[in-house]
Image: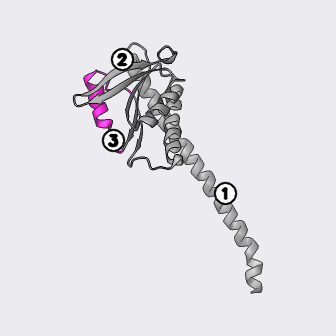
Amino acid sequence: MDQFLIDLPIKVVITIITAIVSFATYNACRLYYLRVVRYRLLKQAEEYARKHGNRVEVCLIASVSTDIEEAVRNYLKAEGRQGMPILKVHQDELFPRKEEVWIAYLERFKNEVRKTREMGATRTYVFTNVPIAMGILLGAVLHNGPEAIIHHYDSHGYYAIGLLVTETVVL
């Protein structure tokens, strides 16, 4: 018992040091990964902008339950915009009656919108497959950013339905 009490402070110190090193390593790896992703997106956006009149355009996908990325890629390809950077927020299951799940999805969407701003996007192509209430929240987030072209899906595929700019929503 006495040996256990003598060794206890050493074990505690080793545990604390291990936790600190693990935390620092995780954060360093995470920051490196974020830089790599940001660099790739910026490079892709610059290449796309050179091909399309120096206009930085980004595709933003928000979907729940059904992943719409393939349909969006087909639309962009048909429009001649297949090199556009694509940012996506997807959730496999429908929203439950828990506010925190809705807010978490909205926060993930906000993070993607922040990335579009960091890239210097002047236009965002928005494709959604979300409940109407979430669509309203996403529109409020997009209202503060660059112009957004909103797309709708029907049995024939996607088509642009309007521009989300300040002039569109001012009463």
Gap between marks 2 and 1 measured at Cα: 47 Å
Q: Earlier in the sequence, mark 2 or mark 1?
A: 1
Tell which residue pokes out farthest to the bottom in this image: 1
Magenta-tinted stretch: 65-84
Mark 2: amino acid: Lys
Seen in the picture, residue 16 relative to 168 is either above or below; the reply is below
Residue 120 x %, y %: 51, 22
Q: How many marks?
A: 3
> Which residue is at 50% across, 50% downward?
98
How crowded pointer 1 is (Cα within 10 Å; few <14, some 14-19, many 20+) is rated as: few
| Residue 20 badge | 1
Gap between marks 3 and 2 measured at Cα: 28 Å
Residue 67 is one of the magenta-drawn residues: yes
| Residue 99 badge | none
- SS under mark 2: helix
- SS under mark 1: helix
User: Which residue has dot 2 on it?
Assistant: 51
Residue 87 x %, y %: 42, 34
